[in-house]
């Protein structure tokens, strides 16, 4: 089971750059990069809320469950 | 935590300064004698049987024990100081600190076992010098071993703390 963060997809759809998203949400570019590359272990509701507001989307647009190899925890 | 660790880091340097004097005291040597009359130094407290009465291997075992104890103590102190120094820099939950704390634990746990070998050799040497029966003993220093186990337990807790820290760092 894998949870995929579709941040790059949403950024492309909204024609937004990472730096602009960082300014709008107050989340650092490094942290957004961690999310984008799938290295994040968890996401706070406050972060999800900020991203959904900035990208004008629902949480389901940003994260999806994908069948696949088990994550190492 | 950093400010307390910085104070501890400075106090450690005071301990390092005192250490040579403590070692000399243990050996029964006054520091002033090293300067005034080094030829007259007779290391060690007055013994019922002087070291000169022991066979060479006995004297070697005696001074080997002395050197071994100080080496273990100095190594433990150096490792401990390194941990405190890293803590003073704010870098506590790292894998290398875990390795060092675990090493300290094993050092304190295994050093008493090696000490038994030295102590029995020394006892044998004194027994032969005094024509006494040799009475071996097999129990390592439980206090040192206890501290070693305590440090290994701290290392286990530190491992979990590092894992939680990594999880927190990757929680966006």
Image (cartoon, rainbow, N blue to C red):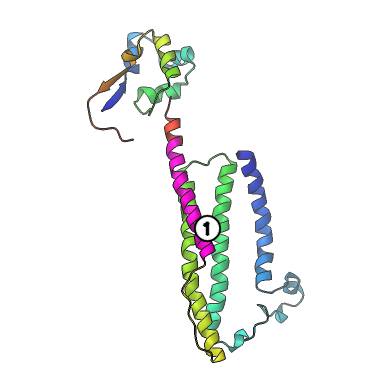
Please tell me how crowded label 1 is: few (under 14), some (14-19), or many (20+) other residues with Cα within 10 Å.
some
Give me the residue at 47% from left, 21% from top: A28
Q: Position of residue B164 (x, y in %)?
A: 44, 36
Left/right of residue A28 with respect to residue B2 in the rendered view = left
Q: Is residue A54 above or below residue B78?
A: above
Please say if B54 is above or below B15: below
Residue B75 image offset from top left, x and y in percent: 54, 60
Magenta run includes residue B151: yes
Q: Nearer the viewer, residue A23 or B47?
A: B47
Pinpoint residue B65: horizontal percent, then vertical percent.
54, 73
The residue segment tinted magenta is B142-164
Q: Main secondary structure of the magenta part?
A: helix
Dividing the picture into quarters, in which one does residue A21 lie?
top left
Point out the image quarter for the C terminus of chain B.
top left
Q: Residue at x 49, y 83 (%)?
A: B135
The residue where tag 1 is placed is B147
Magenta stretch holds residue B15? no
């Amino acid at each position: 089971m894998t949870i995929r963060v579709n941040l790059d997809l949403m950024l492309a759809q909204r024609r937004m750059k990472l730096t602009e998203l960082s300014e709008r949400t107050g989340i650092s570019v490094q942290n957004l990069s961690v999310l984008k590359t799938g290295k994040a272990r968890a996401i706070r509701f406050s972060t999800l809320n900020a991203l959904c507001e900035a990208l004008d989307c629902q949480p389901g647009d940003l994260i999806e469950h994908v069948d696949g190899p088990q994550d190492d925890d | 935590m950093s400010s307390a660790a910085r104070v501890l880091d400075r106090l450690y340097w005071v301990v390092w300064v005192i250490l040579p004097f403590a070692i000399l005291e243990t050996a029964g040597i006054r520091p002033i004698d090293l300067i005034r009359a080094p030829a007259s130094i007779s290391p060690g407290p007055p013994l019922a049987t002087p070291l000169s009465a022991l066979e060479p291997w006995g004297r070697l075992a005696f001074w080997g024990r002395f050197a071994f104890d100080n080496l273990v103590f100095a190594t433990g102190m150096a490792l401990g100081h390194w941990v405190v120094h890293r803590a003073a820099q704010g870098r506590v939950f790292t894998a290398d600190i875990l390795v060092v704390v675990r090493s300290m634990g094993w050092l304190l746990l295994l050093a008493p076992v090696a000490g038994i070998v030295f102590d029995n050799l020394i006892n044998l040497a004194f027994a032969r010098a005094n024509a006494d029966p040799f009475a071996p003993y097999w129990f390592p220093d439980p206090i040192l071993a206890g501290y070693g186990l305590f440090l290994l337990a701290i290392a286990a807790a530190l491992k979990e703390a590092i894992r939680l820290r990594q999880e927190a760092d990757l929680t966006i």
